Image (cartoon, rainbow, N blue to C red):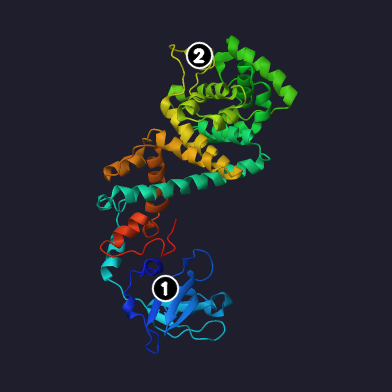
Amino acid sequence: MKEEFLHYLWKYTLYDPDCLYDTAGNRIIVRHPGEYNRDAGPDFFNARIIIGGTEWAGNVEIHTRSSHFEVHGHNNDHAFDNVILHVVAENDRRVLNARGEELLTVSLTFDPALYDRYLDLVNNPCVIACQDDISKLDHFFLRHWQHALVIGRLMEKSGSIRKILKDTGNDWDETFYRLLSRYFGFRVNTEPFEMLATSIPCRIIRKHSDNRFQVEALLYGTAGMLEEGLFKEALSDNYYRDLVREYRILSAKYSLKPIHGWLWKFSRLRPVNFPTIRISQLAAMLTVSGGLFSRVIGAGSLDRLKELFEVKASEYWYDHYVFGKKSRGVGKNTGQQAVDILLINAVIPAVFTYGKERGRPDYCERALSFLEETAPEQNSIITEWENAGVGSESAFCTQALIELRNEYCKKRRCLDCRIGTRLISMGKSLKGQEELMLEP
């Protein structure tokens, strides 16, 4: 039996409480199981139990066998001296703490069907182990869990954004520029876009934000796309030659060093997603008056926000996909799906993090509302959930399901998942959140 399963039984009081007695035959009454601890130290802090009419407050340690207390070295660790109860599946040995005092040890009695259901989940070959049973749960319950998952996912992304913010000296414009550039790579070109954003600072682009051609010259040149020989057909191309001349002037002025042009990937990409097109679209976004991030923070509606990212590549790209090679004319707008990807992965997390950093919960709520209003994502993970009978009305739902699948289902953290714990305990009564320290 796994120790984590015993943690689950204890946390949710899914054992037989009438079978807890000390060595003198006194009934043990658990008033509170304690706060679940995932770090070093006892498994549950600040538990409260009553023995023989006396209430005790302290910690609870849990093992599959009592002898594991010594196997794990807790008998020599004074951090475990305040353990008031040692909970086990099998009491195979008397154990002492570091002060030489015997631990009060009790064995849990529980319905074996609970463990069988747990094993059915963790041993299920499907990634979504509960896909055949999840329909048994009501929509409100799932929605409540999705909300916690979305907050957790945004908090995780906030950690990455705060790191960039620290690296940029708390410059929000620079931070957002780097974040946006990263997701302009759309996976295939993520790394070169990140390198580009760190090689040409936003402060330099801001100085030329009223001249789109100069911004494009700065971006294409620093991206290494103006290297001689990279686009052989471009040598006689007027637009290309103008960019080269402009970049020579600007790179000398700002001491810019381009990244290697061969880093950019074009193969297996649809032409509209070529990095040449994406860089021109990025330039269009960065030439808005007043600064892009200021406009993002000031956008009070999703429609206003989308307007900032629904842009078109410059006129040259109407009949080009790469420098110097003409193609059939078609406008190179950022598609709705591309805009949604930027909103979900860069823009909305930035607004959420800004609210957290500035102590402005209204921005955090706005970020969640934007997710609610954004169309649901379409990918293989969401298809898995749809096959399991779980649909999505918005990006809020799809982000929750992606987090659930990747951080819980894939890692078989069924005992940390509200869906898993509910399904395993089906037919049993779980204590309410006001009585137990439930996981967020």
Which quadrant, please, contains the N terminus? bottom left
Of the pair 309 and 436, the residue shown nearer to us = 436
Q: Closer to the N terminus: mark 1 or mark 2?
A: 1
Give the residue at x 54% y 76%.
80
Which quadrant, please, contains the C terminus? bottom left
Task: Kindly identify which residue carries mark 1.
Answer: 31
Whether the residues at callouts 1 and 2 have beta carbons within 8 Å, the answer is no
Give the residue at x 40% y 45%.
400
Of the pair 196 and 323, the residue shown nearer to us = 196
Q: Identify the element where label 2 is drawn.
A: strand
Hey, which residue is sitting farthest bottom in the picture? 24
**Residue 369 coordinates in the image, percent (x, y):** 44, 37
> Residue 353, located in which quarter of the rendered image?
top right
Give the residue at x 47% y 72%.
47
Q: Identify the element where label 1 is drawn.
A: strand
Q: Is residue 123 visible?
A: no
**Residue 54 coordinates in the image, percent (x, y):** 46, 83
**Residue 253 coordinates in the image, percent (x, y):** 74, 23
Task: Kindly identify which residue carries mark 2.
Answer: 325
- Inspect the image, locate mark 1, and give the three-letter code of the amino acid beneath it: Arg
Of the pair 226 and 405, the residue shown nearer to us = 405
Mark 1: few/some/many CA within 10 Å (<14, 14-19, 20+): some
Mark 2: few/some/many CA within 10 Å (<14, 14-19, 20+): few
